[in-house]
Each structure stands twice: as structure tokens, then as C-alpha cells.
Amino acid sequence: MKTVKSVQGDTIDLICWRYYGRTAGVTETVLESNPALAEQGPILVLGTEVVLPDIPAQQQMTKTINLWD
């Protein structure tokens, strides 16, 4: 787990995008780890500490189609 401090204008989505490189499925996990953040509203107060849990990397699923099957 890592802890970061918000800067002016930060949202939880933006912090997730910066740290994890994605928001889908990650924002919810961060909110579960930081239940008090939801009470602050969409824009975090400057200097708010946000705990970023360890989330496994998303696996790339490439579906291939064989034309002769």
C-alpha cells in the first residue's frame, strides 16, 4: 500500500489514473480503502491523504478468430 497527498483540484479518479494508469474497477477499491473520502465530495481538499492499495495488473485479453474453423 502506498499513501499519496492530493494536490489542488484532485479527484479520486485522477489520482487512480495517475498511479494505476486506469480507473475502471480501481476507483471503487480505493474508495473501499478510504471510506471517509466519499464524504468530501468529488474534489478532494488540498493535502488529503489517500491510501492506494495494491491492485494486481490488469491482464490483456486478446481474442483471436481463426477464419477456417
Image (tube, grey):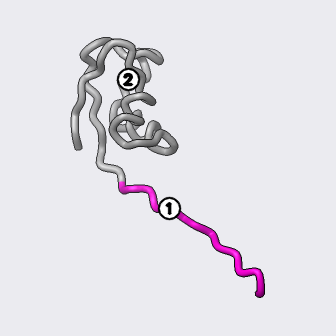
Q: Tell me the residue that label 2 is attached to.
A: 37
Residue at 47%, 39% (x, y): give it.
23
Q: Magenta stretch?
A: 56-69
Q: Is residue 22 magenta?
A: no
Q: Nearer the viewer, residue 59 or 49?
A: 59
- Residue 14 lies, in percent from the top left, at 42, 28
17 to the left or right of 48: right
- Residue 6 lies, in percent from the top left, at 29, 21
Q: Are marks 1 and 2 in contact (CB under 8 Å)?
A: no
Q: Earlier in the sequence, mark 1 or mark 2?
A: 2
Residue at 77%, 86% (x, y): give it.
68
Residue at 37%, 23% (x, y): give it.
37
- Residue 10 lies, in percent from the top left, at 38, 19
> Label 1, label 2: how many angstroms apart (C-alpha)?
30 Å
Secondary-structure class at tag 2: helix
If the image is split into quadrants, where does the C terminus sit?
bottom right
> Which numbered mark, 1 or 2, is in the foreground of this view?
1
Name the chief secondary structure element in magenta.
loop
Residue 57: image quadrant is bottom left
Q: Residues within 10 Å of mark 2 (few under 14, many from 20)?
A: many
Give the vertical position of 59 relative to 50 (above or below).
below
Q: Nearer the viewer, residue 17 or 40?
A: 17
- Residue 56 lies, in percent from the top left, at 36, 56
Disc number for residue 60: 1
Which amino acid type corresponds to the residue marked 2 in the rendered image? Leu
Q: Is residue 58 magenta?
A: yes
Secondary-structure class at tag 1: loop
Q: Residues within 10 Å of mark 1 (few under 14, many from 20)?
A: few
Residue 34: image quadrant is top left
Disc number for residue 4: none
61 to the left or right of 29: right
